[in-house]
Image (cartoon, rainbow, N blue to C red):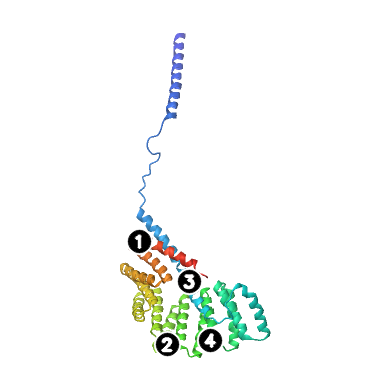
Amino acid sequence: MGKKLIMGAMAVMLIANGVVRATEKDSLINKHAKLVGPVYFDASPPVDSALLYKQVIGKRLLKKNKEAADLVKYNNVLMLHSLLNQTEISQEPNETLLPTLKILLEDYKQLNDQRSQALILNTYGVHYGKKGNIPQAIYYFNEAYRLKENLNDKPGMVAIASNLAALYRLSGDFQKAIIQNETVIQLYRSMNKNHAVAETYLQLAENKVSMNKHDDAEYYIIKKALPLFTRMGNKAGRMKCFQGLTGLYYGQKRYSEAKWFCIQTTNLAEKLNDKQALIGSLIHIAEVKNALEDHEDALVDYKKAESLAIQNQYMVKLVEIKGDMGETYNLMGNYSAAGSALDEYSRLHEKLVKGMVL
């Protein structure tokens, strides 16, 4: 009996030792073991590169559409600078002369010389307008206008009111711009300058469009500006009316009417050899065709406009065209061409914005 117990105990010890040794051996094996194959196998489908590129182009087009306001602003700046350059001033303004002008202004006030005061106030207005300080420019032009009104200097009043209309439009205060347009129209009527009256009606209509008052804009173009230009036999003026109606109807998705007036604009632009108007007309008709999903024909018109813009060095139009071509290629599903057009658009847009004063 004792012998059996001793033998059983020895067996248990051997098994225990074997188990321990086996465990130690296994741990050594595990220590040097290396995994074969991937740790984790992802069975999801591969990335669709075409879809990814489409999404990238979509984001770039959104950015382009946000930047469209830059082109409008640039055109408004050009118009403002053109007006400022025609404004009667005492001398070419610069920072170093401002203290001297202030002294002169006080002297002219003592002498009650309103004409000279108005000249200096105009000089301040032009200076601040070109620097992009719109509130200061508006202040000085309003002061100058009051003096010109006292003097009944209608040409001077027209020039200042035109400047104010452009400044208010640039600042986004379209209602005040319209008030200045109406003032200019009254002054031109009293001076029997019907051509200038008609031109100002078009500016007034443009401000109405900016306020989404499309019926008012249509009225001022069709009932006011167009009859005046027609009576005077002014083809260039009629063409501008057709351009205005094209943009107005396109914005309202009245594509058939927009297309008809666009064709009339093109015909007159060709007769008058007005390259800039022709480029604008080609852009508009391409926009209408895109809206009607005729993308290939739209691209043909954009390429014609692009060629003319390059030949005549119309940078603003070229930027617009390149961006629109990118959008057209995108609608056609040609994302590579869309990317190339948008690359060119971005380069030209950056260059344009760098040169913008306001």
> CB atoms at circles 3 and 1 under 8 Å apart?
no
The amino acid type found where label 4 is placed reads: Pro
> CB atoms at circles 4 and 1 under 8 Å apart?
no
* Dot 2 or dot 1, earlier in sequence: 2
Element carrying mark 4: helix
Q: Give the residue number, with chain letter if any, for mark 2.
A: 228
> CB atoms at circles 2 and 4 under 8 Å apart?
no
Q: Seen in the image, is 41 located left or right of residue 155?
A: left
Identify the image quadrant of residue 334.
bottom left
Residue drawn at point x = 37 percent, y = 66 percent: 325
Identify the image quadrant of residue 194.
bottom left
Q: Give the residue number, with chain letter if any, for mark 3.
A: 74
* Dot 3 or dot 1, earlier in sequence: 3
Q: Give the residue number, with chain letter if any, for mark 4.
A: 155
**Which of the pair 170/245 is nearer the observer?**
170
Q: Give the residue number, with chain letter if any, for mark 1.
A: 337
Residue drawn at point x = 53 percent, y = 86 percent: 155
Q: Nearer the viewer, mark 4 or mark 1?
A: 4
Residue 291 seen from this side: no
Q: How many marks?
A: 4
Residue drawn at point x = 48 percent, y = 77 percent: 207
Residue 120 seen from this side: yes
The amino acid type found where label 1 is placed reads: Ala
Determine which of the numbered discs, if any, sits on residue 328 in the image. Answer: none
**Which of the pair 205/150 is nearer the observer?**
150
* Dot 3 or dot 4, earlier in sequence: 3
| Residue projecting furthest to the right | 110
Q: CA distance from mark 3 to mark 1?
A: 27 Å
